[in-house]
Amino acid sequence: MALKRQAEPEPISGCPRHVAIIMDGNGRWATKRGRPRLFGHHAGARRVREVLEACPHIGVEYLTIFAFSTENWKRTQVEVAGLMTLFRRYITRETSALVASGVRVRFIGDRVRLEETLTRMMTNLENATAHNSRVNLTIAINYGGRDEVARATKRLAEDVAAGTLKPGDINEETLPRYLDTFVLPDPDLVIRTSGEARISNFLLWQSAYSEYEFVDTLWPDFTRAEFESLCTSYGERDRRYGGVKA
Ligand code: IPE
Ligand code: IPE
Ligand code: MG
């Protein structure tokens, strides 16, 4: 994709270390243009690169994006199949740029329901970028916070049954080790585009103390400038974690 030449992004003071984005509004963006919803999804996928490229410059170490929820299977077969094709195409097109630009890619979500061609590509991309550390991109596909907690609880129960974990040792530190995000820090900032002010089952455990930004922009219109401005506002926020301001 040809990007417009923009000045190199500057480091942001107090920049969030981990930003998670609910990329919403692709369908409405397409409908407004009299085009099929998938047209919006393709336009949305093209926005990811610009935001990702800004991250290491401004100070974001982890970017996590919500691409497909456990509830999105309710959509038409045409839309679901189109999205799966888009994910495969994204991986094929972006792999060399991701490897070359030092991005470490991880996927979260339940892979069991995904087609094998796609899961193989996901694993290959994770392996191809496993030695990168400039910025961490996590893509949530067939991800649901409740489903993740349920899957984690199942594995935890298996460890208890096998005797490798004592019930008395289950606490706020041990439980998240069973989540898909076990290697990631909690998100500092969660952004949702498209004007909807809801979480839609995204990172339920992990975002307990995250800051939220709900913006009206539809995801295919979201720019690097808006991303940087939200990260700047985050730097001015006062996170108290239940305490009292000093
Ligand atoms: C977000 O855009 C992308 C996915 C959920 C896959 P939507 O497809 O939800 O777009 P709207 O909300 O219908 O506009
Ligand atoms: C959330 O958007 C999921 C993704 C962005 C992948 P949805 O469009 O699926 O959420 P709802 O249905 O508006 O809550
Ligand atoms: Mg939506």
Image (spheres, rainbow, N blue to C red):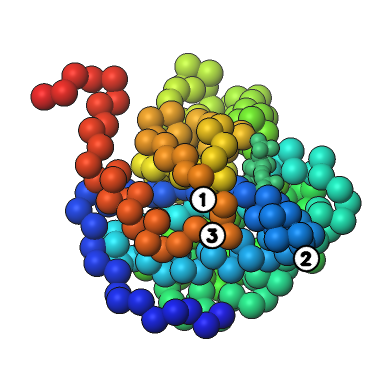
Quarter of the figure with the N terminus: bottom right
Circle 1 residue: 217
Quarter of the figure with the C terminus: top left
Q: Amino acid at mark 2?
A: Thr
Instruction: Work out whether 3 lies above or below 122.
Output: below
Q: Position of residue 63 (x, y in %)?
A: 45, 55
What residue is rendered at 20% in x and 53% in y?
A: 13
Circle 3 residue: 221
Circle 2 residue: 85
The alpha-carbon separation of the residues under discs 1 and 3 comes to 6 Å
Q: Is residue 115 left or right of residue 21?
A: right
Crowding around mark 3 (Cα neighbors within 10 Å: few <14, some 14 to 19, many 20+) is some
- What label sits on residue 195 in the rendered view? none
Q: Nearer the viewer, residue 34 or 185?
A: 34
The answer to whether residue 141 of the structure is visible from this angle is no
Q: Is residue 244 left or right of residue 89?
A: left
Crowding around mark 1 (Cα neighbors within 10 Å: few <14, some 14 to 19, many 20+) is some
The alpha-carbon separation of the residues under discs 3 and 2 comes to 22 Å
Element carrying mark 1: loop
Q: Give yes or no for contact between labels 1 and 3 (Cβ–Cβ under 8 Å).
A: yes
Q: Is residue 188 left or right of residue 64?
A: left
